[in-house]
Image: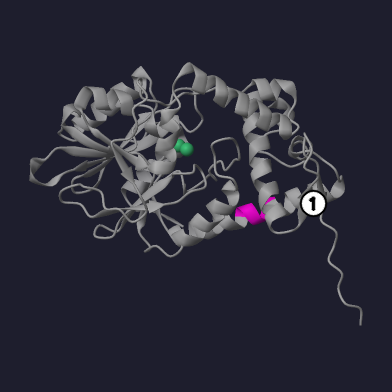
Amino acid sequence: MIVTEDLGTVQREAWAAGVLPPVEEVRPGLWSIPVPMPKNPLRYVLSYALALALDDGLALIDLGMDTEESWDALVAGVASTGHHITDVRYAAITHLHPDHFGLAPRLKETTGAVIAMHAADAAALGHFTPEDVAADKEAWRVDLTGLGAPPEVVEAARFELVRFPRGESADVVLAHGDRLDLPGWNIEAVWTPGHTPGHLAFVDRDRDLLFSGDHILPRISPNISSGPGELGDPLHRYLLSLHATTALPDCEVLPAHEYRFRGVTERARQLMDHHEVRLDEIRDAVASRPESTAWEITTRVTWSRPIDVMDPRLQRLAVRETQAHLLVLADRGDIRSDGGTPARWTLSAPTHTKEN
Ligand SMILES: [Zn+2]
Ligand SMILES: [Zn+2]
């Protein structure tokens, strides 16, 4: 993997130094704008601003969290490109997470911009009444209890609601292969489910660019986790999406976090390998103590910091990530669940090899 020369290096150095990178003109008429994420170790999301032909305004790819600080940074970033925030007439959202979608309602209200996203993520926007929220919360409680999570982790379910205030949906629903309606640009939506059910990347073959959202990041592996309203088998889908990504042209990658780079095929393979190592570790954890719950297995595998010092919200992400791996191992016939509440996992009986 090569960090893109010149400006990509500036982004990586800013990353390493723990500061916000500058707004950069990545190509003529295309800028990356770092939008801070308060109190989050990822520090910023990269919003991309695209000048439309015929002075038809500006489009954005991803926006930032719904905070005052993020909004001000986005407005200032757009201003430094020589435009005004009210010039934005289109926003393509890679996925529904609050760091990408969060400012969409405010942007739409301020500028009238069209909000475009994949149907599978747009579907979750409909759940906005108090009854919907209560039902979602109950579904999470049942799900986490089924993973054997302790009560403090079950109750840590905190909802960061990413919704339009009146339950509106996306204005444009994008499907795999759709071209974005942006004068002067030839950008195609690439459905990359896994991190979320409706995650989209955007490829610009004319300018040799891949806007990768959170699907592919240069340094970290995006969270892939199971849960209500998520993909049934998210890691399986993510691995398929990574595999499909290796067939894309070897573009410069413009990710939503960290820094831009080249070598998408190599990075996709690294991420696939990472999950294979993780699958092996989780299979071993099942083998070492049969009839374990997803939570028990979570406490026996390695994490970036010890599980018992993690905040319950991170513990909840960890157990859901473990579950995503258990589902793939079950698909592959390596392990099986007793189907109970909580479900307990055991290695499948070894298949008998014919004796010589
Ligand atoms: Zn995300
Ligand atoms: Zn993100």
Any magenta on residue 293? no
Q: How is the image coloured?
A: one colour
Closest to the observer, 84 or 356: 356
Any magenta on residue 277? yes
Q: Residues within 10 Å of mark 1 (few under 14, many from 20)?
A: some
**In the image, residue 303 lies at what x, y percent?**
68, 39
Q: Left of 243 or right of it: where is 119?
A: left
The amino acid sitting under disc 1 is Asp
Work out which quarter of the rendered image holds the C terminus and state it: bottom right
Residue under the image location 38 percent in, 23 percent down: 66
Q: Is residue 330 visible?
A: yes
Ligand 2 falls in which quarter? top left
**In the image, residue 199 lies at what x, y percent?**
44, 45
Secondary structure of the residue carrying tag 1 is helix
**In the image, residue 342 lies at what x, y percent?**
77, 34
**Magenta segment range?**
274-278
State the predominant SS element of the stretch in magenta.
helix
Residue under the image location 64 percent in, 41 percent down: 321
Q: Left of 185 or right of it: where is 145?
A: right
